[in-house]
């Protein structure tokens, strides 16, 4: 069996555009929602985790409100349906982990819906 030896994949620190590829719920060691983001230019996939608790003051709640500001208390929301396939902007930063390796991390609070602007052709 042969495998290809590849260069390390990493993103430069800063602002990026991507898409929410998929969302997974995990329970070990805690209830977390993992949001997988595919960066547009490189195809690099990053994981952004949030404790699975949604209020207007929690990490997950603040994120969901960016995509659906009309969420009311006691309303049921499906994060997978709300986020998957959405075009976004996000910031990354590279940090050194305890194991000595450097990892690219999505900056908390930086995920936002992508806002596109159309150029108006000046006729005249």
Image (spheres, grey):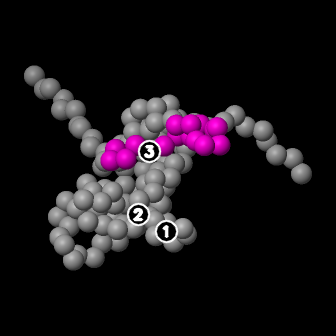
Q: Quadrant of residue 119?
A: top left
Q: Which residue is mark 3?
A: 106
Taking 121 as reference, is 91 left or right?
A: right
The disc placed on residue 30 is: 1
Q: CA distance from mark 1 to mark 3?
A: 20 Å
For label 1, count other residues whose C-alpha is less than 10 Å away and answer few (under 14), some (14-19) or many (20+): few
Where in the figure is residue 64, as x and y percent of width and height?
29, 60
Taking the magenta stretch, the answer to whether it contains residue 101 is yes
Q: CA distance from mark 1 to mark 2?
A: 8 Å
Taking 86 as reference, is 11 left or right?
A: right
What is the secondary structure assignment of the residue under circle 2?
strand
Where in the figure is residue 21, as x and y percent of width and height?
48, 56
The residue range painted magenta reads 95-110
The disc placed on residue 4 is: none
- From where the camera sits, is residue 110 visible? yes
Where in the figure is residue 14, as x and y percent of width and height?
41, 32
The disc placed on residue 51 is: 2
The residue sitting at the left extreme is 124
């Amino acid at each position: 069996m042969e495998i290809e030896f590849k260069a390390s994949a990493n993103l430069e620190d800063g602002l990026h555009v991507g898409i929410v590829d998929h969302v997974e719920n995990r329970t070990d060691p805690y209830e977390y929602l993992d949001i997988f983001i595919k960066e547009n230019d490189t195809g690099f996939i990053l994981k952004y985790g949030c404790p699975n608790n949604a209020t207007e003051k929690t990490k997950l709640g603040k994120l969901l409100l960016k995509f659906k500001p009309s969420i009311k208390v006691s309303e049921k929301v499906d994060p997978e349906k709300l986020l998957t396939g959405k075009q976004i902007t996000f910031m990354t930063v590279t940090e050194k982990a305890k194991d000595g390796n450097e990892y690219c991390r999505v900056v908390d609070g930086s995920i936002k819906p992508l806002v596109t602007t159309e150029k108006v052709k000046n006729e005249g």
